[in-house]
Amino acid sequence: MRFVPPPATTNPRYTSKSCQHSGCEETTREGKPYCLHHVDKNPYARRLLDNLEQLEREHQRVRRRGPSAVDTKSDTSREILRELSIQRSCSVARLAQTLALPYPLTLSYVQALARRDLVVTSGFRRDRLQVSLSNPSLEQRCRGA
Ligand SMILES: [Zn+2]
């Protein structure tokens, strides 16, 4: 009996599908619904991109207008509170580094959160400014999230 290799199409990795974007005739990789040019039509990818755009717009607003432009319920604010629930107390410089955000932007968020009594800051020197959560029950909530 002669060995007959199975046809390549039985492996889903090699199944070629065409892109679902209307008018696009590209084939997609590894059975994905959209080609590389139209990956942003994928609802999940679209949602991630929308979130990023929204975040970028908020950061631009905060860079221009300072703490008053901060939404203390935004993803960035929540990230800061969550980070503080883990670190307990850390310098604003360290917080900026951890969140990969510019220092002045992070400082604006911290100042806005401090105005709402969500965090407390201590120290005066720029490189020594410490921040921590002001309310232990909030800490619990952040840990739970
Ligand atoms: Zn396409």
Image (cartoon, helix red, strand yellow):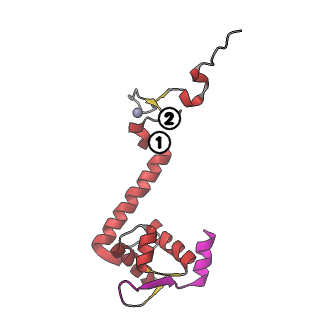
Circles 2 and 1, Cβ within 8 Å, touching? The answer is yes
Which numbered marker is on residue 7? none
Q: Which residue is mark 1?
A: 42
**Magenta run includes residue 5:** no
**Looking at the picture, which amino acid does disc 2 mark?**
Pro
Find out if the beta carbon at label 2 lies less than 8 Å from the nearest ligand 1 atom: no
- At x 44%, y 76%, the residue is 94
- Residue 44 on image: x %, y %: 50, 47
Q: Is residue 117 visible?
A: no
- Residue 114 on image: x %, y %: 44, 83
Magenta stretch? Answer: 125-145
Residue 23 placement: quadrant: top left
Label 1: state its secondary structure. Answer: loop
Q: Which residue is mark 2?
A: 33
- Please state if 4 lies on the left or on the right of 73 as rendered: right
- Residue 14 on image: x %, y %: 54, 27
